[in-house]
Image (cartoon, rainbow, N blue to C red):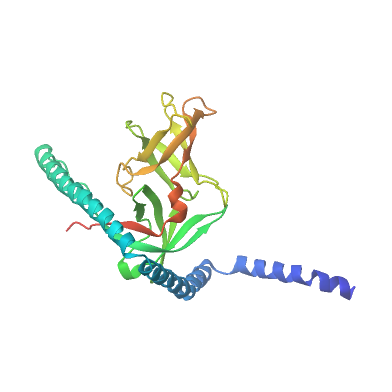
Amino acid sequence: MPKRYDQARPFLTLGFVVAAWLVIPTVFKTFTRASFFELTAPVGVAASYARDLQEYWTLRLHSNGELIEAGRDLARLNASYDLAVQQNIEMQGEIARLEGILRLPSYTGFRSEHARVVRRDFSGWWQRLTIRKGKNYNLNVGAPVVFSGGVVGRVSEVFAYTATVDLISSQTVRLAAVVEGDTRPISYQGGLNPTFGSAGGVIEFVPLDIFASANSTKRLVTSGLGGVFPPGLTIGSVIKVEPSTDGLFKSGEVKLDERLAALTEVTVLLTIETP
């Protein structure tokens, strides 16, 4: 009998801990979780700075010829970016002129806050990043996060010096989208993604006259509805659509950018408060 009790003791202890956690007030759980993240954040941030320092010294080992070639490539990029900035200024002026003629309210602007990625956390349950900025840079929950390829996700938790970003591939992220060239909104949600597989999502309420396949993909972009993400940002490519069970709409699959799993820096869009 004592031997049997000793074998069951770990399970009894586990059951007691689970039962105790269930009856603990939610406020205490939230405080404990936030305190844990605040205590462990310096470890991840320090490791991130160490990686940046390692990359710096790695670049210092390149030959002069490689550095000269990289400088030429950078000069070409700067020239193209200068042209893009000029075009952007012209378009903003045209938009302001049209808003004045049509008496339309100005579109809410954003300011960009760039942040380094501290940690990536991919599993079948969640897809998220930890970034190296938080309340110290006035980040807020729900803020959209983007990169050069389009949507990254949105901020889900903000701590003192770090923040958690739920990726666009996470099932917790749901937003209104449109197929490029079409104005009818459809529903996008992150899919159930394997740990080592390609990230993807699902779409619902797709109009019946929209077709897509692996050989003829459609670009899926943000619609701007809801005021969280600006319109026109790339979400992914629609690789499959098929009629839903109700026969009124279609549902489909979306392939996301493979670079999401290797991002080192992202941009958080923060709403500019109008006076």
- In x, y percent, where is residue 154? 39, 54
| Depicted 53 relative to depicted 253: above or below | below
Q: Residue at x 33, y 48 (%)?
A: 229
Instruction: From the viewer's perspective, tell me whether residue 199 is left or right of residue 75.
Output: right
Name the quadrant of the C terminus: bottom left
- In x, y percent, where is residue 166? 45, 55
Q: Residue 70 versus residue 215: which sits nearer the camera?
A: 70
Name the quadrant of the N terminus: bottom right
Q: Residue at x 22, y 58 (%)?
A: 273
Q: Residue 40 versus residue 77: which sits nearer the camera?
A: 77
| Depicted 12 relative to depicted 78: above or below | below
- In x, y percent, where is residue 204? 46, 35
| Depicted 212 relative to depicted 146: above or below | above
Q: Is residue 232 visible?
A: yes
- In x, y percent, where is residue 18? 66, 66
Q: Residue at x 80, y 69 (%)?
A: 8
Q: In the current view of this chain or complex, which residue is farthest to the right?
A: 1
Q: Is residue 109 visible?
A: no
Image quadrant of residue 90? top left
Total labels: the figure holds 0
Q: Residue 251 versus residue 117: which sits nearer the camera?
A: 117
